[in-house]
Amino acid sequence: MQNRSKGNAQGIDVSHWQGKINWQQVKADGREFAFIKATQGTAFVDPRFYENAKGARGAGLLVGAYHFMDAITVQAAKQQAAHFAETMKKAGDVFELPPVMDYENNPGNLNKATINVIALAFLNEVERLTGSRPMIYTGNAFAVNFDTSLGVYPLWIARYSNTRVPDDRAAWKRWTIWQFSDSGKVPGISGNVDLNEFDGTLNDLKVWAKKMKQKEGAAAVSDKVNVIVDGKKIKDGKLVDGVTYVPLRAVGEAIGAKIGWDQNSKTATLETKE
């Protein structure tokens, strides 16, 4: 992946472990954005989330929220997404940066395929509930678990080094945000704090953040639409950024066609019965 560049926007991420923060001093130190821990699991809310979100926004920083994801089932992932979205909603209109899934360990000893299914379940639900495309935070080593299906989500990568860039992974060849230190010193914060860099200037960050939000009038990723094929209604049609997506199997069943799948070439086929 790419190295850091002079002129890139600088930021931090915090939780209750940083204690009470003087956000005006943080801003005066040149920090331009902050991600705040919001939630974990299906019930926990960081004790300083609301205070930090309001304080950072009031000081003029761009603010985002993150959820520490530890679900081991799809159902739990969706429940955690709902808890995250509801907590963000209660904080008010303070978030200009996209919501973040912090997925960095494997408490259930899941295989890679399951990790990806659970991650997508969480991300899709967050996007549906918030109207914003989320991003993924993970560690340099743990990122190897994510396949190319997650590459559509921007990467916030943790690698604490001044010399080694994050490694290329199947899903990503570039980072959007790099957490390059967990032992930063910033005025207004007692003790250590994580330091981050966006791949671009502050203006670039603002433009990118706006693009992450759904276009006005576009449906969220899981909005259902009605699709009719030869007079038959297909279930589970979805509208994503103005594009309709329909399961191929549903189309095949509607028109009486045979559906095939070649795992080696990753090719789907649809054959009519003529």
Image (tube, rainbow, N blue to C red):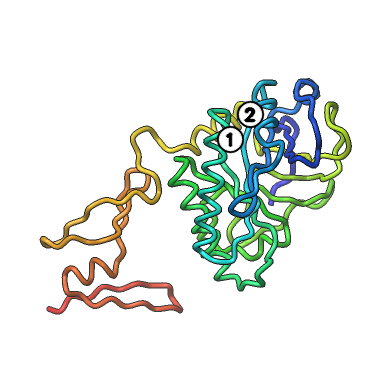
Name the residue: 78% across, 26% down: 26
Q: Position of residue 219 (x, y in %)?
A: 35, 42
The residue tagged 1 is 97
User: Residue 146 versus residue 272: which sits nearer the camera?
Assistant: 146
Residues at marks 1 and 2, CA–CA distance in whole angstroms:
7 Å
Q: Position of residue 157 (x, y in %)?
A: 69, 50
- Choose the circle earlier in sequence order: 1 or 2: 2
Res. 62 mark: 2
Name the residue: 72% across, 56% down: 139
Q: Quadrant of residue 55?
A: top right
Per the image, label 2 sits on a secondary structure element best described as strand
Name the residue: 18% across, 60% down: 233
Left or right: residue 139 versus residue 93 is right
Q: Residues within 10 Å of mark 1 (few under 14, many from 20)?
A: many
Left or right: residue 195 versus residue 252 is right
Q: Quadrant of residue 95?
A: top right
Q: Position of residue 15 (x, y in %)?
A: 74, 41
Give the residue at the far front of this rendering. 43
Left or right: residue 76 versus residue 34 is left
Asked whether disc 1 touches disc 2, contact meaning CB atoms under 8 Å apart, the reply is yes
Amino acid at circle 1: Leu
